[in-house]
Amino acid sequence: MTKSGVIAIVGATASGKSSLALVLAEKLNAEIICMDSMQIYRGMDIGTAKPTMDEQARVPHHLLDIIDPMEPFAVADYVRYAEHAIADVTQRGRVPMLVGGTGLYLQALMHGLALGGVKSDEAVRSKFVDISNEPQGNLRLYFMLDAVDPITAKRLHPNDVRRVIRALEVFELTGIPMSEQKQDKPDKPYEIFPIGLLMPRELLFERIALRVHQMMAAGLIAEVEQLLNSGISPDAQSMQGIGYKEMVPVIKGEQTTEEAAGQLILNTRHFAKKQGTWFRKEKEIHWIDALSSTNVHEAASAIQSFLTTERA
């Protein structure tokens, strides 16, 4: 069976992925599938740099606004949604184009993902959450994890409670430490061709600062306040995203707007560095210069070659 071709446009935040993807999608009869862990949430538009309605009108977009901000969302959930979208776009004779900077999503789609098949159990999770709410509960959970899975514990911080709890949950449900979980690598009916955008760090940081100032001017604080007023906890998974957690102290009167903007710029820079490190580990990415005037033509040429190659 010949596998269908899927394109992925990846890179650090503010590197120009969305702009390039729009042009390529129009040239290649493609539809865009969001590969961003924050753009999936409804009502979180400014802080996620979500495509505008005009951009969505230019090219069909999928997996935007698919869940409420109070809902938990795991990588396995994303894979299920994305593979359904890929099949739908392919069946209609168009090219699926993944666009975003969430490296874990790309890895899960390309190679499968350890833990992908381990479903969450509310009773088990609640037990660990209750422990986390006790005095020194975070540290207690961390020592519990270190006792059963020291390898995973070593790569996590004791205050990274969500991931510590998830690792404990996986061990309790399967009896196998997260670090020893076998990767699930099913034979997928598609093959992904990832294209990455390269940009000098200094320029990327300038673009990040500009984007943050634009978000602040567009009403980011008001967006976060509206989410909190709607009943969403500042501790919700969605509110831990960059662009949202930094605004909460402003709303509480604990920081000034200028301090929050500065913290957001700094956190986004750190995040961009992590994205770069993550994507550089993926050997299959075809890298292009984001600043080159020929990047669209170079990417389109590489994609056309990929799409016309038979894939077993």
Image (cartoon, rainbow, N blue to C red):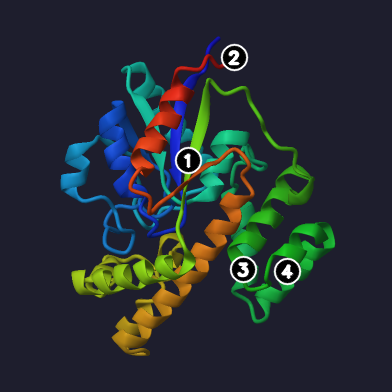
Q: Earlier in the sequence, mark 1 or mark 3?
A: 3
In the current view of this chain or complex, which residue is farthest to the front? Answer: 293
Task: List the residue tagged with mark 2.
Answer: 312
Q: Earlier in the sequence, mark 4 or mark 2?
A: 4
* Few, some or many residues within 10 Å of mark 2 (<14, 14–19, 20+): few
Q: CA distance from mark 4 to mark 1?
A: 38 Å
Task: List the residue tagged with mark 1.
Answer: 195
Q: Are marks 4 and 2 in contact (CB under 8 Å)?
A: no
Quadrant location of the C terminus?
Answer: top right
Q: Nearer the viewer, mark 4 or mark 3?
A: 3
Task: List the residue tagged with mark 4.
Answer: 142
Q: CA distance from mark 1 to mark 3?
A: 31 Å
Task: List the residue tagged with mark 3.
Answer: 160
State left or right for residue 167 relative to residue 199: right
* Percent of width and height locating residue 8: 45, 38
Tell me which corner region of the image, top left, top right, bottom left or bottom right, holds residue 21: top left
